[in-house]
Amino acid sequence: METQNVSRSNDTTLKDLRGVLVLGPDGGQLVANGIALQPELASRMILAWHEARRKDRRLFPVEGLDGTPVVVVVLPASDATLLVAMEREGRNPLFEFVGAVDFAGDILAHFLTSPFEALAVVDRNAIIRYMSPVHERFFGLKAGAGIGRHTTEVIENSQLHNVVETGKSEIGLLHEMRGVTRVVTRHPIRNTNGELVGAIGQVMFKGPEQLQALSNEVLKLKSEVAYYRRELSDLRNRSYGLEQMVGDSTAMLRLKQQIIKVAPLDVPVLLTGESGTGKELAAHAIHKLSPRRDETMVMVNAAALPSTLVESELFGYEAGSFTGAERKGRKGKIEQADGGSLFFDEVGDMPADVQVKLLRVLQDGSFQRVGGSDLRHSNFRLISASNRNFQAMIADGSFRLDLFYRIGGVTIRLPALRERPEDIPLLVNLALQQFADRHRQRAKRVSEEAIVFLQSQLWPGNVRQLMHTLERAAIFSEGDVIQPSDFGILGADPTPDLPDTAFSQSEVSASALESTPRGGMQVRSAVEQVEEQLIRQALAKFSGNKKRVATELGISRSYLYKRLAQMGLGVEPDN
């Protein structure tokens, strides 16, 4: 086909396009109009097209004859290629999109036909110019039946005419159509000169229930995230407040007041008291009420620290320090507590060689990792706990005086359970409720006689022993109300099947008191005698099985071993 020259046209469409050049399959010029009629510019367009085709580009620039930049968009057809020329007075997103994406038509078809992005298009007079097939089917219209009609004649409750009048968008509004509620958005459309040329309406959700379902899902996820953040914080800090320290007796109120006063102060605290009085709970309360509450409280059982591993456990080690060491090294307990609190439990049972190694770090926080040469520093708040008599230990040389001064800046003594019997009803209710919650059972009650009986006991194992005793009674009691006889070895009327050597705690307490001189006997001495008799009787009853003895008496095995050593009995573990 010979080249055809088409005269310039004053038609607005041709003026907007600036020029079109049609090429045949062989690349020869077939048709031209607009600025593409200029032979030199047409040659430039064809040369640039060959280069763009090698690079698989659908959009490329050429220089106009007067130096004005011209943008050319390639529109391939089956038997021809159209080169659309535009003077680049500004970016034209539509032409750039069509020129850059070879499946641009498919994308536009998706937006026009998808039920979730379906459009209704009106011009500046609110006359419908396009309605997606989805909308046509919804309103029962034949294809194209709504085009050319005012939007209010076709779309029930339409507001598109208001959008073209006001030029303001409407987003996320409810639209009732044929008994169906949908969430829609409406936008005014402006041309490159900023003139309003029409408006579009689009369905965002088929109904508010979808939006509500999405909102509910987001709220659910937010709630779960908040829950797990709280759980993570509790796991990291293991911090419990004063509300976990049950009791409103004078002794407990005094203890809580002392904790409230000392917690904000960055001084070391030593918690003393018998085993089972709640020293760990008090340590958590001090940490939670301190300015370090958002950091970690690191726990160290001083009695369980082997002298061979104490340095690596407390100070950490560098990579390759010893056989079996982690490749990256590891932080010790002291370094982990930087910024938080360091809780030394059973500090009175710390071996002598370990005491020496702690002196420097407790003085200024300086330490070195095992295998390292760098001097490190940890800023922690020290909280210690022990049930030992420090005065006696310092006197016999088993605990260093200088170390005691460093850990005992403030000493708080926790009262024994026998010193606050009025708190026993609260503790009983707490223990039975927690037991019922763990096992998904209905909580049992304790009779008034049983309460009086429990308040009359000495409780050498304190709260821990009381809790174990109540759990055991909750398991074996037949009714919903626990009676004194349900407490087994602590019962007022021991069962006849028990050996002759097994007495009730009341009998043991009476015999111990009677065998002691009436003048000058101390409470602690009497308690130790009661403990010793109970332990000996339980050992006889269970043939020396220490695990069962500890369970029966409601004390920990470590405390049992300690008492056995003090009694001069063997401390070999059970087989």
Image: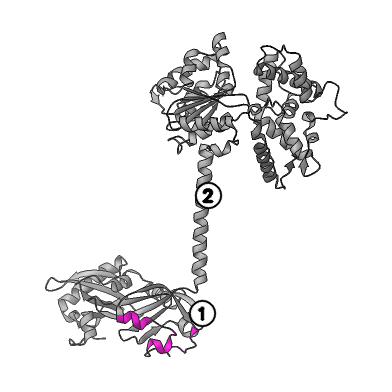
In the rendered image, residue 164, in percent from the top left (x then y), is placed at 31, 81
In the rendered image, residue 360, in percent from the top left (x then y), is placed at 43, 18
Distance in Å between CA atoms under marks 2 and 1 = 38 Å
Residue at 65% over, 33% down: 422
Q: Which residues are magenta?
A: 138-165
Q: Is residue 8 above or below residue 324?
A: below
Which amino acid type is shown beneath numbered disc 2?
Tyr
Q: To which quarter of the image does residue 95 belong?
A: bottom left
- Toward the front, the furthest residue is 519
- Toward the right, the furthest residue is 496
In the rendered image, residue 352, in percent from the top left (x then y), is placed at 54, 14
Q: To which quarter of the image does residue 531 belong?
A: top right
Query: What residue is disc 1 on?
Result: 180
Please name whichever residue, 238 or 190, is drawn nearer the observer in this view of the structure. 238
Labelled disc at residue 453:
none
Which amino acid type is shown beneath numbered disc 1?
Val
Going by the image, does 73 lie left or right of 480?
left
Q: Is residue 113 above or below residue 541?
A: below
Judge whether residue 139 is colored magenta: yes
The image shows a total of numbered marks equal to 2
Judge whether residue 404 is colored magenta: no
Q: Can the viewer see residue 328?
A: no
- How would you classify the magenta stretch by its main secondary structure? loop
Query: What residue is disc 2 on?
Result: 227
SS state under label 2: helix
